[in-house]
Amino acid sequence: MLRKEELIDKLQLEKHPEGGYFKETYRSETLLPESALPSEFTSGRHASTCIYFMLTSDEFSAFHKVNQDEAWHFYLGKTITLHIVSPEGNYSQVSIGNDFSQKETPQFVVPAQHWFAAEIKTEDSFALVGCTVAPGFDFDDFNLAEPQELQQLFPQHKEIIQKLTR
């Protein structure tokens, strides 16, 4: 298997504001007008976008949410633990990977407007996934959690919020 540095170079990955590395690999040519989208969207969007996303064990993907459902597709590496908090405050976690005997799943969809964060618990490792959203991603749809605000909304999840916010 390639080392993470080799993969970052080969796939031309860049640092992501939430943590980890990414590269957009697809942006649909089809444009959806703002009038066809829910009220959370402030302008038109491409129909769909995809990225490579690499997470390493020496950092985490901080709690954030987007206006779209986000499908995660596991490619290689170690298991990613995805932490999710619904708008109503319900917490869940999912193991994204390919060890089916450990109830990992190679694909998972985070519903729109759910706060989520990710980490790799295996030391000195990484994972490569793909993330797909529809309508397509725009940084206007990205909301990185402020630790204090998220803890005020969901005090019952204070520990995981403190661990996975900046």
Image (cartoon, rainbow, N blue to C red):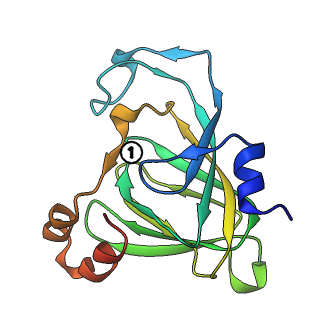
Count of numbered badges drawn on the protein: 1
Q: Residue at x 22, y 58 (%)?
A: 146
Farthest residue to the left: give it: 152
**Where residue 91 appears, x then y in whole percent?**
36, 74
Dot 1 crowding, Cα within 10 Å, few <14, some 14–19, many 20+: many
- For the question of whether residue 27 can be seen, the reply is yes
- For the question of whether residue 114 can be seen, the reply is no
**Where residue 14 appears, x then y in whole percent?**
57, 43
Horizontal placement of 58 versus 36: left or right? right
Horizontal placement of 99 versus 122: left or right? right
Horizontal placement of 52 versus 115: left or right? right
Instruction: From this view, report whether residue 64 is shown above or below residue 164.
Output: above
Instruction: From this view, report whether residue 95 is shown above or below residue 140.
Output: below
Taking depth in this image into account, of 9 and 155 the one nearest to the observer is: 9
- Residue marked by disc 1: 66
- The residue type indicated by label 1 comes to Val
Which quarter of the picture shows residue 35?
top left
Which quarter of the picture shows residue 166?
bottom left
**Where residue 96 appears, x then y in whole percent?**
64, 69
Can you say which quadrant of the picture contains the N terminus?
A: bottom right
Q: Residue at x 28, y 57 (%)?
A: 145
**Where residue 76 appears, x then y in whole percent?**
77, 63
